[in-house]
Image: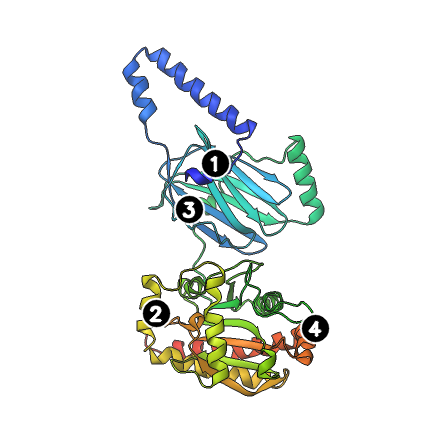
Amino acid sequence: MAGRANRYLSSWAVALFAAMTVACAGSASLAAGDAAVAQTAAVEPFPVASDVRLAGDGKQTRFVLDLDRKIDLRAFVLGHPARVVVDIPQVTFKLPDDIGRKGRGLIKAFRYGLVMPGGSRLVFDLSGPAKIEKAYVLDAANGQPPRLVVELAATDSAAWAELVESADKGTGAELRPTQPPATVAADVAEPADRRPVVVIDPGHGGLDNGTQAASGETEKAIVLAFSLALRDRLAENGKYRVVLTRDDDTFIPLGDRVKVARGHNAALFVSIHADALPRREGDAQGATVYTLSDKASDAEAERLAESENKADAIGGVNLTEEPTEVADILIDLAQRETRTFSNRFASALIGEMKGTMRMHRNPLKSAGFKVLKAPDVPSVLVELGYVSNKDDLKLLVSDSWRSRSVVAVARAIDGFLAKRTVSAGTGMD
């Protein structure tokens, strides 16, 4: 936590708050006239933050922080980049080390830490313009601990610019604690979202470009654009919760991509890639769908799996010391049902894609892709085409081709999950 704290710059508001806290503590000690009391107050533990929850979407997002006691807060916005800041008294954060790296809805990511003795801070990196609708702290109730709640709502660029300007001038962009709504006070937790989760995995990212065309186009950019379009298409009907392993140019280790699928109890995992062949191996074109297999279906599949599995080395991940979770995954590969569902979806996907997209001469293949090794999540890897083939590349960077192809993939997902939902619903109550 000390490392995080050192990254923050204390604001005049936090400094003032801390100074007032110290002054009040000093006054209380003098009034009591008892040095022992002052010493007891000094060692009194700080409020403890024990859990975090995010709920909502790109229109409205709620942040909830569990505490062991009520505290005060002050919330305001900052621009360049877009952030929401919440200043609170000094808090002991007992949260997982990696919490905040991934956000939800309007919160792209968040950070927290000590900004100075007596003051802590929460910083939300926003995914788009947003305003603070409410910021409050709930009393413990209905088996729930005290909770700090921040509610954000999407706004337009003009309104956001006004918020930032007023914050800079100190003329009203900050929000003091408000009274919580009665409905939220009774139960702040969002209703359980029982929609199937679809995890879309844009391959590569960050310092890992993936394959690259002679003209400069990178696989990481091509597959991210496709994945974002697929996410938006799937989100239109509201039938699924769609999760991306990355929604920007970020490097994500292969094992973490698998953990995203398992952590969300995903109904389906689709990894998106775009292959390339070295000149010495000739030319190839068309889309291919891969499923997991201990033995590659052909030499090309084996080459591709080996290449993709080495991607972690680019990000500095030690492949020789894999964590227990990955070892467990390898053991669980014997789960036949998941492979059966993966193969079933792969066949359905090819059926939809071939009506819209150019397909490889052997469109269904298998190999030992590490990213497909979630034992309980049906998973496929889609190679949209070959960036080394000029005709494929022309399509891969085409907006119209992307739109048509996204529709085909979305139809396959709809058909597959509709059958699984019906099948799951026919069991005994």
Q: What is the spatial separation of the Cα atoms under label 1 and label 2, in whole angstroms?
A: 38 Å
Viewer-nearest residue: 392 or 62: 392
Residue with the mark numbered 1: 6
Residue farthest toward the bottom in the current orientation of the protein: 361
Question: Tag 2: Cα neighbours inside 10 Å, few (<14), some, or many (≥20)?
Answer: some
Residue with the mark numbered 2: 329
Residue farthest toward the front in the current orientation of the protein: 280
Q: Nearer the viewer, mark 3 or mark 2?
A: 2
Residue ID at (40%, 62%): 263
Amino acid at pointer 1: Asn
Instruction: Determine which quarter of the picture holds residue 205.
Output: bottom right
Residue with the mark numbered 3: 186
Amino acid at pointer 4: Ser
Decide if residue 369 is on the left or right side of residue 400: left
Q: Earlier in the sequence, mark 1 or mark 3?
A: 1
Residue 72 visible somewhere in the drawing = no
Q: What is the spatial separation of the Cα atoms under label 1 and label 3, in whole angstroms?
A: 38 Å
Instruction: Determine which quarter of the picture holds residue 113.
Output: top left
Percent position (x, y) of residue 86?
52, 38
Helix, strand or loop at label 3? It is helix
Q: What is the spatial separation of the Cα atoms under label 3 and label 4, in whole angstroms?
A: 50 Å
From the image, which quarter does the C terminus lie in?
Answer: bottom left
Question: Tag 4: Cα neighbours inside 10 Å, few (<14), some, or many (≥20)?
Answer: few
Percent position (x, y) of residue 222?
62, 68
Q: Nearer the viewer, mark 1 or mark 3?
A: 1
Percent position (x, y) of residue 259?
41, 63
Helix, strand or loop at label 1? It is helix
Q: What is the spatial separation of the Cα atoms under label 3 and label 2, in whole angstroms?
A: 40 Å
Q: Nearer the viewer, mark 3 or mark 4?
A: 4
Q: What is the spatial separation of the Cα atoms under label 4 and label 2, in whole angstroms?
A: 37 Å
Helix, strand or loop at label 2? It is helix
Amino acid at pointer 2: Ile
